[in-house]
Amino acid sequence: MEYPESMQEFMDRFHTEEACRKYLVQIRWNSRFACPRCSSVSAWEYGDGTFRCTKCRRDTSVTAGTVFQGSHIPLRIWFQAIWSVVSQKHGVSALGLSRALGINRQKTGWSLLGKIRGAMVREGRERLKGVVEVDESLLGGVRPGKRGRGAFGKTLVLIAVEDKGDAGIGRIRIAVIPDASAKSLRDAVSRMVEPGSTVRTDEWVGYSNEAMRGYRHKILKRSSSEPGYDPTPLVHRVASLLKRWLLGTHQGGVKETHLTSYLEEFVFRFNRRSSHSRGKLFYRVIQEMVGANQA
């Protein structure tokens, strides 16, 4: 695993298109060409970054079949965009990214940011396990009318948090759900939590025995003797951080159609909050964008 450790190292290393291509070859093919048709490792390399397999004569490039394929944006700009996103602790908006990269069209910045966010979700990632606290939360700011579950004009999300005891909060998962029915909760929990885990919830009827089948279900009841008691404090802590992040980084201007990508970015950042290396995050995003197997 090789990646830049600082901004200066990043700038020194990836100042040309050739340097960026070589890094993609290193990550995607482990520094050695592999023909997608015949698996041969022998090829002629041309100046434009194209490889011609010496066995089957097929032409290919390291960007073929990746997020970078067909893009008119230079790899240098792609790399700078990825570094900008992962190196900022609280993230960056499409407008901020466009300005940082000198891109005149905000739409281009939005497209870059959307694809980078998509690469923050690793295909086949592990589900949460152990003791997992689960509860819903509403996103969408202050609205008049009904409050709580079923409030109009807001988006309901399900938040799952690993409880690591004295070690604090572990990993998290967040998903948009259509409602708080048993079916919706069951579908979301089964995607986020490993069967056999202990799922801790409040007394909401949606967390029925059928919905929680396959899990050790622990219901925490609200205490009349303790008015301030919170049965799902970890979820509410994460929900508070999420709302603050959406407001601070994106000024709360998040459309529902794009909300999932924002949530995935927040999850990516939160689950790697203790990482001391921004370069490693850069490496992981590049891995996902070229479809490389991750250790």
Image (tube, grey):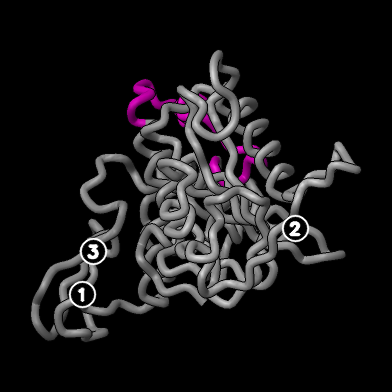
Q: Residue furthest left?
A: 57
Kind of element beneath mark 1: strand
Tell me which label, 2 or 1, sits earlier in the chain.
1
Label 1 belongs to which residue? Answer: 44
Residue 136 higher or lower than 291, as above or below = above
Label 3 belongs to which residue? Answer: 61
Q: Residue furthest right?
A: 225
Q: Is residue 192 magenta?
A: no
Q: Residues within 10 Å of mark 3 (few under 14, many from 20)?
A: some
Three-letter amino acid code at the position of disc 2: Ile
Three-letter amino acid code at the position of disc 1: Trp
Q: Quadrant of residue 148?
A: top right
Left or right: 179 as drawn, with respect to 172 = left
On the question of residue 182 being in view, the answer is yes
Tell me which label, 3 or 2, sits earlier in the chain.
3
Q: Quadrant of residue 102?
A: top left
Residue drawn at 49 percent across, 44 percent down: 180
Residue drawn at 27 percent across, 79 percent down: 34
Q: Is residue 98 magenta?
A: yes
Q: Residue furthest front?
A: 224
On the question of residue 77 being in view, the answer is no
Residue drawn at 49 percent across, 52 percent down: 14
The location of residue 169, given as percent across then percent down, is: 75, 58
Real-space Cα distance between discs 3 and 2?
42 Å
The stretch of residues the image draws in magenta is 85-108
Of discs 2 and 1, which sits in the foreground? 2
Tell me which label, 1 or 3, sits earlier in the chain.
1
The location of residue 290, given as percent across then percent down, is: 36, 62
